[in-house]
């Protein structure tokens, strides 16, 4: 018998004592680690899986045995042992790539959008603010981050990202409530009244026709719409 008769422990295992007589004496690297070394004689040859990955079995023999965290999740420490170590991107953020290794890999939803759950893995997970509302910052994490258009204005599309997207009600109309979602939210001034300004936010903005004049239609937008009474 000679030293050449001794069989190396396979990659992913080591034995740190002399005189081993069985393959089962070779000790598997712990979960979260791997070793590419054949014939390893020290636990130090077992290397942590890198951040962004984990290994949930013993005896991994290659870095590729460490599994990437799925899209929507990251892990920022080495040596992770479970898929549960992968952390969901915070609400308001997403990541499309697997193997993310820091929270900063998670991308903020664009202005005008929000997402209210953890672990989003696509930009499409970000939800448009509904018509009548806007969000002017990135990374919104709940529907309530969407801001109502002020009274006197409306916006009729989803996903608006600035206050200037809100449109003034036209002259002759007003809206007293915030969050107008269409032109139909703007209410005609009553017959006998008019308003010449855009963006009116109250019925009181509608001005009565002067004495001796009248207008029969609603939604008048000029004093000139008021007609003289006949003699």
Image (cartoon, rainbow, N blue to C red):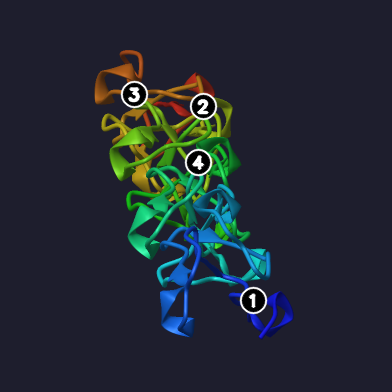
Identify which residue, 189 or 72, lies in the foreground: 72
**Please, is residue 188 above or below residue 58 in the view?**
above
Q: How far apart are marks 1 and 4 (CA)?
A: 34 Å
Q: Which label belongs to residue 201?
A: 3
Residue that appears at 65% across and 63% down: 63
Task: Specify which label sits upstream in the sequence, 3 or 4.
Answer: 4
For discs 2 and 4, the disc positioned in front in the rendered view? 4
Helix, strand or loop at mark 3: loop
Residue that appears at 39% across and 27% down: 152
Task: Specify which label sits upstream in the sequence, 3 or 1.
Answer: 1
Q: Distance between the residues labelled 3 and 4?
A: 51 Å
Helix, strand or loop at mark 1: loop
The location of residue 105, given as percent across then percent down, is: 59, 42
Q: In this view, does 114 lie to the left or right of 203?
A: right
In the rendered image, which residue does mark 4 sit on?
76
Task: Specify which label sits upstream in the sequence, 1 or 2.
Answer: 1
Identify which residue, 141 or 172, lies in the foreground: 141
In the rendered image, which residue does mark 1 sit on?
8
In the rendered image, which residue does mark 2 sit on?
163
The location of residue 217, given as percent across then percent down, is: 38, 43
């Amino acid at each position: 018998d000679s030293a050449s008769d001794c069989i190396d422990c396979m990659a992913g295992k080591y034995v740190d004592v002399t005189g081993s007589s069985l393959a089962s004496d070779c000790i598997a690297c712990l979960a979260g680690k791997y070793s590419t070394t054949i014939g390893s004689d020290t636990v130090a040859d077992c290397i942590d899986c890198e951040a962004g990955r984990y290994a949930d079995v013993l005896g991994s023999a290659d870095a590729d045995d460490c599994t990437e965290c799925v899209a929507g999740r990251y892990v920022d420490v080495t040596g992770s042992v479970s898929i549960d170590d992968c952390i969901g991107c915070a609400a308001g953020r997403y990541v499309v790539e697997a193997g993310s290794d820091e929270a900063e890999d998670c991308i903020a939803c664009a202005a005008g959008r929000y997402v209210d759950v953890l672990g989003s893995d696509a930009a499409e997970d970000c939800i448009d603010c509904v018509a009548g509302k806007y969000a002017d910052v990135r990374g919104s994490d709940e529907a309530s981050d969407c801001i109502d258009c002020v009274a006197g204005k409306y916006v009729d599309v989803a996903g608006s990202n600035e206050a200037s997207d809100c449109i003034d009600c036209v002259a002759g109309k007003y809206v007293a409530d915030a969050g107008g979602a269409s032109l139909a939210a703007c209410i005609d001034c009553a017959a006998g009244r008019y308003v010449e300004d855009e963006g009116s936010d109250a019925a009181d903005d509608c001005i009565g026709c002067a004495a001796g004049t009248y207008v029969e239609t609603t939604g008048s937008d000029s004093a000139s719409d008021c007609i003289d009474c006949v003699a």
